[in-house]
Image (spheres, grey):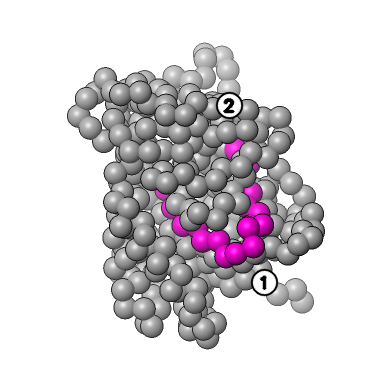
Amino acid sequence: MVAVLCEASAGSVPVVDVGPLFGRDAGAFARTARELRRVFETVGFAYIAGHGVKPELIEALFAASRQFHALPIEAKMRVKMNAQHRGYMPFSTSTIVTSSVARVTKPNQSESFMMMHEVSPDDPDVVAGKPLQGPNQWPEELPDFKPTLIGYEAAARRVGETLARAIAVSFDLPAEWFAPHFAKPTTWLRLLHYPPLPDPLPPDLFSSAPHTDYGFLTILAQDDTGGLEVRGRDGSWIPAPPIKGTYVVNVADVLMQWTNGILVSTPHRVRNVAGRDRYSCPYFYDPGIDTVVECLPGIVKPGESPRWPATSWRDYVMERLDKNYVYRQRPQA
């Protein structure tokens, strides 16, 4: 099977068929893993086909998102974002200030609901007071909302696990090399709603301002509205419109550090200029909270040093959350 369905060219993001990653042919797995690595080295983004997630699961997720965002604000605020980063995030409450790719802009023009990995109140990580640990919040007005998100998250997690194995193999490591770091992964399923941006569009106003993602991999389901743009190596912005049956997957900062910069965490942004509401559902597949990220073995030559020192995922992600989200910031005296 040919892994690349659509080769990258000027102004495009390649499409990779990852179906062989879910099969039993070790040779096909390795070839697809190497092709995925090549795309992640050069573009940092890929559309992936053959991921195995049922279309009806994705359709149900978007239906749930639209239902949630159609609720009255009073209902949404009853599950307002808590200290464990779970729940509803109102409009204009996130601003990109930790990115090196653009000036500080106006707050992102979006609202969202965040489901993270489910952690019971008596879990040792909760008892120990570790950050981002705890149960999710659910709107009582939508009885089907919770099972829909839980079902979708399980399918998306399988994709993340499989891609992690492929990345390990592409670096000539055992397929399960990353597994210990994802025994209790940090996962985020975010249901985003972007209203149309005004026309004319101010230069510092974005649906989502230019940024890179924090963690390991992002697996994005987007509707048919468009608006996602990826920054090319020449600084231009490349549209990444929806392609039916695919996800958009990108390398995030921690994976870039793990690979010593071989895989690139590429800046991207969203501008909803379509004149109608846009919905997207990114799934962030990240390591466990206690993970320390160090350069993969075999990358750095003897006598050389990694580009980044060992990095605590806990410290890294909490710094970014604390700076970028209003709910985590203390009022000024």
Q: Is residue 225 left or right of residue 238?
A: left
Residue that appears at 35% across and 50% down: 156
Which residue position holds label 2? Answer: 9
Residue pushed farthest bottom? 74
Name the one closer to the observer, 279 or 265: 279
Q: Secondary structure at mark 2?
A: loop
Name the one closer to the observer, 305 or 1: 1
Determine which quarter of the picture holds residue 73.
Answer: bottom right
Q: Is residue 234 left or right of residue 34?
A: right
Which residue position holds label 1? Answer: 330
The stretch drawn in magenta includes residue 286: yes
Q: How many marks?
A: 2
**What is the three-letter code of the residue carrying label 2?**
Ser
Residue that appears at 48% across and 56% down: 223
Determine which quarter of the picture holds residue 330.
Answer: bottom right
Residue 272: % across, % down: 63, 57
Name the one closer to the observer, 150 or 258: 150
Residue 134 image label? none
Q: Earlier in the sequence, mark 1 or mark 2?
A: 2
Q: CA distance from mark 1 to mark 2?
A: 46 Å
**What is the three-letter code of the residue carrying label 1?**
Arg
Q: Secondary structure at mark 1?
A: loop
Q: Quadrant of the N terminus?
A: top left
